[in-house]
Image (tube, grey):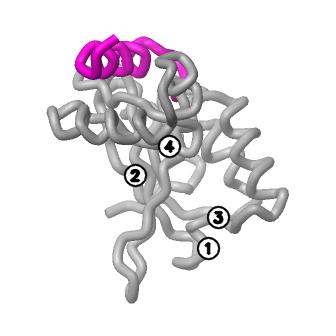
Amino acid sequence: MNAESRRKEILNLIRYNLEPISGTTLAKKMGVSRQVIVQDIALLRAQNNDIISTNKGYVLTSDNKCSRVFKVYHRDDEIIDELNTIVDLGAKVIDVFVKHKVYGRLSANLSVASRRDVMNFMDNINKGKSKPLKNTTSNYHYHTVEADNEEILDLVEKALKEKNYLVEK
């Protein structure tokens, strides 16, 4: 398989995979090194393919999805409820970010789309791998949330507001 064919196949695997796909998995499927995959991803991005890297692997952001940024505030013991509220309504939490007064915007990709993803995320937090990013800004933080349509995002906004997580602008 030549390099161009390989990149087309990589793009298709990322596009049609329901879950993020890791560079290691792509390398095995393509019979190349992970470094070749990293280079191929860079070239695909340069061709205006909106591929993002998450902690679970590569995903292609879809043009037919709607997204909205929500500014939220809650305690650590409410993280599970906040994330489950979003995914239970059929939306996906793309990232979390804070606006730090010294460092500026600090962000992390989450790619949380199910209760299982929420539990995996919380397991990593609870195992002491890291503290929630929101703790750097006194619990204020933002999520980019993606859904199939604006109505779902409206439901997410309403639910976050009802639970007093949403910070009004």
Give the CA distance from mark 2 to mark 4. 20 Å
Q: How far across and down, in percent of the image, does residue 41 sit?
A: 33, 36
Q: In which quarter of the image is residue 164?
A: bottom right
Q: Mark 1 points at which residue?
A: 135
- Helix, strand or loop under label 3: loop
Magenta region, mostly helix, strand or loop? helix
Question: Quick one: label 2 or label 3, which is nearer the N terminus?
Answer: 2
Q: Distance between the residues labelled 2 and 1?
A: 17 Å
C-alpha gap between disc 4 and disc 1: 21 Å
Q: Residues within 10 Å of mark 3 (few under 14, many from 20)?
A: some
Tell me whether the residue at label 3 lies in contact with that at label 4, contact meaning CB atoms closer than 8 angstroms. no
- The crowd level at tag 1 (other Cα within 10 Å; few <14, some 14-19, many 20+) is some
Check disc 2 and report its element: helix, strand or loop: strand
Query: Which residue in the protein does label 4 denote?
Result: 54
Give the magenta part as a residue range: 1-20
Mark found first going from the N terminus, 3 or 4: 4
Can you say which quadrant of the picture contains the N terminus?
top left
> At label 4, which amino acid type do we have?
Thr
Q: Distance between the residues labelled 2 and 3?
A: 17 Å
Residue type beneath disc 2: Phe
